[in-house]
Every structure is written in C-alpha cells, then in structure tokens.
Amino acid sequence: DSGVTQTPKHLITATGQRVTLRCSPRSGDLSVYWYQQSLDQGLQFLIQYYNGEERAKGNILERFSAQQFPDLHSELNLSSLELGDSALYFCASSSGGGGNTIYFGEGSWLTVV
Amino acid sequence: EDQVTQSPEALRLQEGESSSLNCSYTVSGLRGLFWYRQDPGKGPEFLFTLYSAGEEKEKERLKATLTKKESFLHITAPKPEDSATYLCAVMNSGGYQKVTFGTGTKLQVIP
C-alpha cells in the first residue's frame, strides 16, 4: 500500500459526460501528480500541483482540469468525454523536497461508452 | 527537454536466466532516477531511487546502478513472479521537479 488513495476505482460513463476523479496523497506529501495511461501505453503526464498551486502542465487537454485543495487532496475533472478518454488515471504524490520519490495510487479506471 | 529511453521494449527470459534492463536519459540536472515495477492494471510500485553516478541499490533479485548517462536494472536468477513492466523515470533539479518517464520494458519470465 503506497498510501495514495484514489476514488472511484472504476467508472463507466457516456460520451459527452463529465466526471471527477479524487486523490488523497500520502500523509505529509505536498506535491500531487496526475498521469493518464491508455491500454498498453506509457504514462502520460497531465499536471502537477504543489501545496495548492499548479506547478507544471503536461499533455492535458483543455477539456480536463484539476485542482488541489487546502487539505492537499486533489481532483481531476474530465468533461465532454470522448471514447478516446478511456484510460487508467493515476495520481501520485511526493513530499516536494529534493530528490523525493513519487508514490502512485492504484488508479481510476475510466471507460467511456 | 528531458528524455528517457528504455531498452529493450520487451524481454523474455527463462527462469534463472539473469539479464539487465537499460535506461538511458538526458536531463537538465538530475535530482533523482527512479525505478518502478508495474503489473497490468495496477499502479507503478516503487523499487529504487538513485541520486548520483556510481550509486547502487539492491532488493532481493534486483540491483539498480547509475552512471551519468544511463541506469541498469540487473535481474539475477529471475522467477515467474518477476514478470511485469519495469519503468524508469528521472526528476530534474528545476524549480518544480519535473518527472519524465520512459515507456518501460515488459519482462516475461518463463518457468
């Protein structure tokens, strides 16, 4: 158990809909990362937050947004969903200090039908 | 731009047949290099962090080494339960500690 908690574990929704994925980082971790992994593909970096502020953006679509709240949990919002958005979405956290390891949650499986 | 290249893409070994996985990287200042193991449909599981050239770390049948340009994950006498995708990532020393992942090596160990 990495200590990073993601909900929901599985989600099936229709095209055009909006979903919210939730992440609770490890206790004490200030940085949260979101990654997308499509079937048999590598990890695609979406966005990073540190202590509530956006730190870096990767290949995140305009239909997607995220935020980190004062209690450090984070949410990834996916809207106007398309079939191609079906993927595993991972949250990861680190303490944010120098050379710190990133620990991953078990992911949220999103299926768009 | 930081880059991580892993080779081979896939590796099939007989049980007990030792081998090495390669991770070549370019990064604007290395803060850390990470190795993860990922099973299908699961989150990457942390294995090692290496910080500077010459550093080595071991865990059971796995040993990770680091040079200024590449890292190796040596697998000694692998067992079928070692079958997984092994991911390498680098964190740069920039202000926001960007992390770049390789595409992984899919390892299959045959009994």
Image: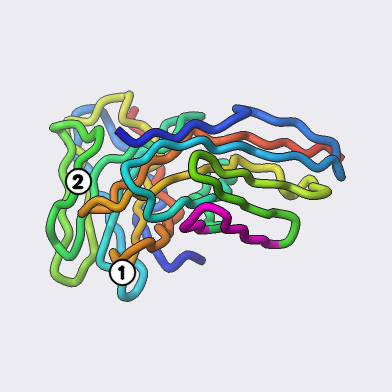
Where is residue B58? Give x, y as percent. 67, 61
Residue A12 appears in view: no
Residue carrying label 2: A56
Taking the magenta stretch, the answer to whether it contains residue B54 is yes
Which of the labelled discs sits on residue A3, or is there none? Answer: none
Which one is nearer the viewer's eye here, A73 or A15? A73
| Quarter residue A111 falls in | top left
**Residue bounds of the magenta highlight:** B49-59
Disc 2 sits on a residue from what chain? A
| B65 lies above or below B83 | below
Instruction: Sort mark 1 into few (<14), some (14-19) or many (20+) by Cα contacts within 10 Å.
Output: many
Where is residue B104? Give x, y as percent. 54, 36
Taking the magenta stretch, the answer to whether it contains residue A12 is no
Which one is nearer the viewer's eye here, A10 or B85? B85
The residue type indicated by label 2 comes to Ala
Which one is nearer the viewer's eye here, B34 or B11? B34
Residue at image point 29% right, 47% down: B98
Which of the labelled discs sits on residue A29, or is there none? Answer: 1
The residue type indicated by label 1 comes to Asp
Disc 1 sits on a residue from what chain? A
